[in-house]
Image (cartoon, rainbow, N blue to C red):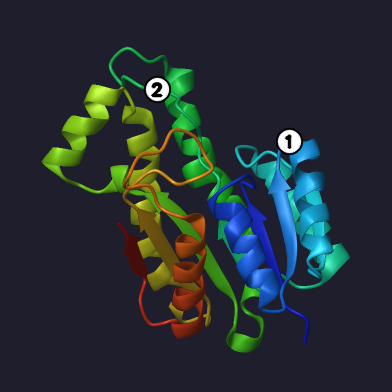
Amino acid sequence: MPKTSMIVGFGPGTATAVAEKFGGEGFSVALIGRNEDRLKAGASVLKAKGINAIAVSADAADPASIRAAVRSVRSQLGPITILHWNAYGGMEAGDLLTADQASIQKVFDVAVFGLLAATDEALPDLKQGGEGALLISNGAFGEVSPEIDEVVVGLHLMGLALSSAAKHKLVGLLAKRLKGDGVYVGEVMVYHPIRGTGPTNDDSVDPSVIAEKHWELYKARNETRAVVK
């Protein structure tokens, strides 16, 4: 039976590497995001490599939009085997004490509401055949650590850290909740900047390493979390 990976939050870096990795393993790939030009270009690159790929425009922060994207992918490629959540809410609410309520709300629109809406809509597919999976890309700012908290506050990235922490907790909850349905839930948490996505340093991580870690988690299906440092 054909397998489909739906990648939400497509862009350079992790999402591109994951699309190439899973596509190279025989999956059809659906790229989801708001930038239609980027989506179409990404799908074209994948097709040139022999990967069956489509582009679907949707807003990960809008539950109705992301539910519609799930239905569109299903209608074009068949049941969804993997839902990969690579979307994040940007740099909203850098300082939680000065940010307005709307900015703080946006922190959770992608990390919680969008993710849950997509999971719920895709769940009938994910339950099929014992191979369904929900894969989450996340950052180390979501860890509970005084050292990390100090860096976050200094960089005015408190909203990003809060969204990462919410996803981190959600992974554990969904893993327990969906285990009985045969749906695997796994998270890759990255501790350094990712090459191709902005400013990097000597500790930057090649996105292919992250993609490989997602693949390892998916195939083994026995660990909920993995760390890339």
Residue drawn 23% across the image and 23% down it:
154
Q: Which quadrant does the N terminus fall into? A: bottom right
- Is 103 above or below relative to 161? above
Q: Give the numbered dot on residue 90.
A: none
Quadrant in which residue 80 is drawn: bottom right
Left or right: where does residue 53 sit relative to residue 122? right
Residue drawn 65% across the image and 38% down it:
62
Sequence-first tag of 2 and 1: 1
Which residue sits furthest left?
146
How many marks can you see?
2
- Is 130 above or below relative to 207? below
Pair 2/1: label in front: 1
Q: Which residue is mark 1?
A: 35
213 and 133: which is toward the camera = 213
- Is 141 above or below relative to 6? above
Q: Secondary structure at mark 2?
A: loop
Q: Position of residue 108 (x, y in %)?
A: 46, 37
Q: Is residue 57 visible?
A: no
Q: Which residue is mark 2?
A: 93
Quadrant in which residue 16 is drawn: bottom right
Q: Is residue 187 visible?
A: yes
Left or right: where does residue 112 sit relative to residue 164? right
Q: Secondary structure at mark 1?
A: loop
Q: Residues within 10 Å of mark 2 (few under 14, many from 20)?
A: many
